[in-house]
Image (spheres, helix red, strand yellow):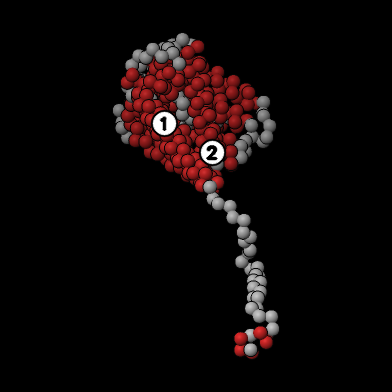
Amino acid sequence: AVAVKMLDDVGELRTRVGRTAISVLIAQDLAVAPMLLIVGGLSGGEFQWTVVLKVAASVGLLIAVTAWFGSRRRVHLLPFKMVVGNVDLLPLAAIGWCFGFAALGGLTGLSPAYGAFFAGLLVGNSAEKRAVENVAQPVQSILLMVFFLSIGLLIDLNYMWENLVLVLGLWLFVAVFKTALNILILQLMGERPQRAFMTSLSLAQVGEFSFVLGATALSNNVITPDLHRLVVAITVVSLVTSPLWMHTVRRLHEQGNLTQRTPMALLRVIYVREWRLTLRMTAGLFQWFEGRFIRIKALYWRWKHARRKEPETGAEILPPDATFEPEEEATEAPFDDEDERPGNA
């Protein structure tokens, strides 16, 4: 949803970049159902080989339905065709359709999430798609708010603060690695560097299905609560920083066709103003530190030179508590005998 909104805001949703990104997102959504089954099969501490059959059945069913819908015109779904003109019953029919397939998926051993996903896939390729979308929009908005409300309840701010370096480091690694990998794959498939770069930026965020996979893994005791909090924290940070990627995609869209061949060259062109500002600030800080260093060095040498010029005295300096007894000066009597004094003559 974040990637689609980003491409729509910059006007790239209907272009080749948007179509490529939407195709990748659809493939990711189709891969969620088998991943849910695999995570559920890891419960109990060991892998259950029956999950392989479930995954094969779910993937085969998805491929068959996708191929069947792709090779023919849109079909009519009977529950929606009967109430397509009734704005009161059509939303109830959509909710009942979703819950019914979710219950069916749970009863067959696949998963309720897989059943609901399959129900949406059928409605999305039916002739009643537009009608269901229009009446289900309020319900979709409410459920979307409830979904993000539940995500907000899962966020542990104390955990994020105590593990801030780990969360930011893993988020940066995921964003950079995912972007670089998508650029490489798209260029190997023949996309131009600019299109590959823009498409990869729109797909750099961690998908919302990470919350679902994390909750499923936690409920099946596959991961610990601390690891689940880490998954939630990384996903939340990725979604919160989406405006940064949107800003990059918008600037790249405004630049038009560029001749740069590397992502780093594209980044230099996109963020040329920020790059120049960073260089000026770095040069100013360097000059400030250089001036302070020269001043401190000059003061040090002045102090050292003044210390060398201090006179050296040879007098002994006693400590304050030392006792000092001055010697009495010997006075030489002018007369040796008292008789020789003037008064005794």
User: Which tag is nearer the camera, tag 1 or tag 2?
Assistant: 1
The count of marks equals 2
* Label 1 crowd bin: few (<14), some (14–19), many (20+), radius 10 Å: few
Q: CA distance from mark 1 to mark 2?
A: 28 Å
Q: Is residue 121 visible?
A: no
Describe residue 127's horizontal placement relative to residue 227 as left or right: left
Judging by the rendered image, the residue that carries numbered circle 1 is 283
**Which residue occupies the foreground of this view, 105 or 286?**
286
Residue 155, percent from left and from top: 49, 43
For image coordinates 47% across by 13% down, the residue present is 187
- Per the rendering, the mark at residue 165 is 2
Residue 243, percent from left and from top: 39, 31
Locate residue 319: give its quadrant.
Answer: bottom right
Looking at marks 1 and 2 on the same chain, the residue that comes earlier in the sequence is marked by 2
For image coordinates 64% across by 85% down, the residue present is 341
Residue 286, percent from left and from top: 44, 34
Q: Give the structural element (helix, strand or loop) at label 2.
A: helix
For image coordinates 47% across by 41% down, the residue present is 298
